[in-house]
Image: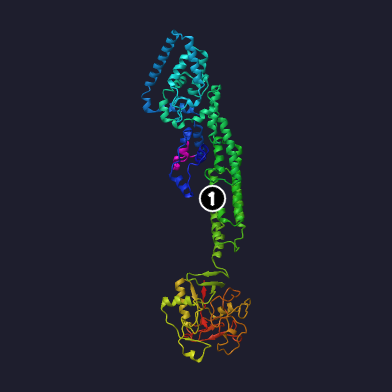
Amino acid sequence: MGIVIYERLTGKVPFDGDESISILVNHVSTPPDPLPPKMRHWQKVIDKCLAKNPEDRFQSMVELKIALDRVPINSIQRTNDTIKNFWKDLKIRKSRWFIPGVSALVLLLLVLIFVLSRNTTPNPEEQKSLETNFKTIQQKPIEQKPVESTLSDTKTDNIPSTNIDTSQIDSTAKDALQNNKAIEENLASSIDENTAPQQNEENITPIAKSEAKQEELFSSVEDKTADKDSLSQTDFDNTDISSQLSVDEIKQQIALQVQDEQSEDINDSQSSRDSGQAINIEALLESARRNIESYQLTKPADDNAMDQLLTILSVEQSHQAALEELHEIGNRYFLLINGALLRNEFNNAVTHLKSFNAFNEKTEYINSGYDVEKQSLISTAKKLDLSSDEISTEQINDLMEFFSIIDSDNSYSKTLQKVLLFKNQPQVGDKLLDSKRIETILIKDNLAMTTKEITVQQYKEFVEATSREESKCRHKGGTLGSFFSNYSWKSPAFEQTPNDPVVCVSYEDALAYSQWLAEQTGNRYRLPTEQEWSFVAMNKQNKFSPCQSANLAGSEAADVRNKEKNYDCSDSFVYTAPVATFSKNSQGVYDMQGNVSEWTRCKEDSCQSPVAMGSSWYNGEQSNGPTFSDKLKDETGYTYVGIRLVRDL
């Protein structure tokens, strides 16, 4: 509110900057620029509104309104306030004896001048000269008014050097009073316009008249303490003092000019406080209704419907329209929460519910239908289909928080916990990724299988960590000389990329790798059994297309020594292909046919003839199939056999 008042008074915001962060810093640490001199009577209100410490600010709209009502609306009232403050000052109070003495001395001098003037009758030429001089002074343009006169304490740098001395004007006017009645009336009017307090003549008490006469004596003190409240030269130019307006009309013009510079929402006069409150109530009510329509119900802090309506009720407790609008706020919150639940936006529902509860507490549960609305919201939440795959575990947690707030019994929490437990468990087809970037997919119940064969790079990490020795490797499909070659997983009979399936690893190597991976990730990895492997490979929904769904022996492998017929098509890979090069099967697993055969787990703890399941790059039309198996030696590796693992959950 302080920022709004400051901007309405000055036409600019109190804190500005080139970037948002600089504006924020100014708000926190920089005081605003002082108001212009003619608006300094607003300074105390602005300073308290914009205080850096929240405890130094106004604590309610009612407190702010009281302060606004006390802001003077013109220079005359500010002068009176300055005089009153002057009398309250302890140091000045000690010297009050001086003021009546000076007043008595001035009165005595005036009486003496009056007696002497009656005995001295001016000749007609002198009287005519006096009348002419005074009319000239009276009709003088306002820009030539004396500096520091009682008209205003504004300090003007543009006053001409030929200004008329104030004491000369007063002396001439007082002499003219004794000789010309018309001049006396004009002078009285001029004095009343410039120095009299703002009140009707018939209501001025003798003490008030005495204080008005003493105003000029205190002008020096007022110049030091109240020059912040002075009006500018332009303000006096606009009042047209040289015209024939009455004193009341001139005061009214000055008051109207000051009002134009004030906020539209502030009362235009203390004297009409009752009518001003009615105007404020209507303005606040209209603003509250606009905020309700735009759903500014309890936020932001400086412009929301709830605070505006409570301000109205602080002035008029039984204001029916304000009470009705508070009920409307409760209804709007119900709509927000219910809509968020139906859209599965449970986090937003929790946020709105917290704001709704805070609203009810601050209004002392004025919303009589809250219990009915609460039960309706609980009913809506319980009807939601939480089994949908679209509902995540995070959303279930949000809904649990919602029920913990709105339902004191929270009887639905057990149901939500069961749903959350179900959501936390992977479902068939869900993919799981461990810390080593090994991806598995849930096949059934608590069994998951690696979607790809173990690669050269993944096995290399294991060897570097364990310093495992290389196993002897045999190359099938080579020449007789290849039988005596020294092949290993690092250098098989053909070139491989880091993403190709590792070969030349024995059954014992495969077991050791699965155990190491389990230790590293904390997951239960092992080799699949023959039954588990067959379950994935022999699914009826799996589709096979030679040279498209698997890397087998085709026309590209014509030079490979193979006793069976190769496929007529070409898959472009004579030996191994990078994993997941070909299409996956219906269960989301790659290369269950072709590429390399895979070690399976022996039924016994140790066996001399473990089985490798599945066809490989070596197999053609006769040996390819999901049931193909080959009994091999456990300590020997082969260039067509690799590793695939399963994970127990």
* Left or right: residue 402 compared with residue 158: right
Magenta-drawn stretch contains 11: no
Q: Is residue 361 above or below residue 586?
A: above
The image quarter containing residue 618 is: bottom right
Q: Nearer the viewer, residue 379 or 6?
A: 6
Q: Residues within 10 Å of mark 1 (few under 14, many from 20)?
A: some
Q: Residue at x 54, y 50 (%)?
A: 354
Q: Residue at x 61, y 60 (%)?
A: 385
Examine the rendering and report whether any part of residue 369 can be seen.
Answer: no
Q: Nearer the viewer, residue 183 or 130?
A: 130
Q: Position of residue 148 (x, y in %)?
A: 44, 26
Q: How many marks?
A: 1
Residue bearing mark 1 = 354
Q: Is residue 247 above or below residue 305?
A: above
Q: Nearer the viewer, residue 284 or 561?
A: 561
Q: Is residue 414 above or below residue 225?
A: below
Label 1: which secondary element: helix
Q: Position of residue 305 (x, y in %)?
A: 57, 43
Q: Residue at x 53, y 38 (%)?
A: 8
- The kind of residue on which mark 1 rests is Lys
Span colored in magenta:
45-59
Magenta-drawn stretch contains 57: yes
Q: Position of residue 51 (x, y in %)?
A: 45, 41
Q: Is residue 504 above or below residue 445?
A: below
